[in-house]
Image (tube, grey):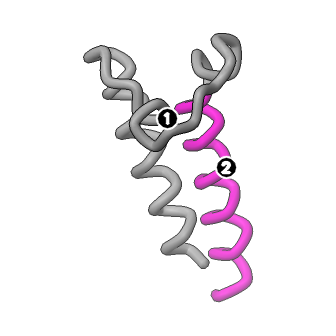
Amino acid sequence: MKIVGILIIVFGLVDLIGSFTGFDLWGTIGIELPEVIWRFSAYIEIAIGYGIMNFFGSEEQ
């Protein structure tokens, strides 16, 4: 499950870097996000991935 968290973090980083370069990752996938959500989507993705990674990482030890 840590791998899923890492993949979500990587997806969020691609979304964050893409937003600075003008690349709309969600639009490429075919999902149109409202402006308010689109603005913070990368940070939300990174936070969710970090939470998943920490939650399931602590159980494996």
Which of 50/15 is in front? 15
Residue 15 inside the magenta-drawn segment: no
Say above or below: 24 vs 1: above
Q: Relative to 61, does residue 55 appear above or below in the rendering? A: above
Residue drawn where x is 54% and y is 70% of the image: 4
* Mark closest to the chain's N terminus, 2 or 1: 1
Which residue is pictured at 35% across the width and 39% down the height?
A: 14
| Of labels 2 and 1, the one closer to you | 1
Percent coordinates x, y for residue 45 in the rendering: 59, 42
- 49 on left or right of 22: right
Position of 39 with respect to 55 (left or right) is: left
**Alpha carbon distance from label 2 to label 1:** 17 Å
Q: Residue at x 39, y 36 (%)?
A: 28
What segment carries the magenta color?
41-61
Magenta-drawn stretch, dominant element (helix, strand or loop): helix
| Residue located beneath label 2 in the image | 48
Q: Which residue type carries mark 1?
A: Trp
Report the amino acid beneath label 2. Answer: Ile
Residue 49 image position (x, y, % from top left): 60, 54
Q: Is residue 44 magenta?
A: yes
Instruction: Give the x, y percent position of residue 30.
Output: 50, 39
The residue indicated by pointer 1 is 26
Mark 2 closeness class: few <14, some 14–19, many ≥20 residues within 10 Å: some
Circle 1 packing at 10 Å, graded few (<14), some (14-19), many (20+), is few
Q: Is residue 44 above or below residue 11?
A: above
Q: Residue 41 appears at what percent x and percent y?
A: 60, 30
Disc 1, SS: helix
Identity of the residue drawn at 32% across and 23% down = 23
Give the position of the N terminus as an image quadrant.
Answer: bottom right
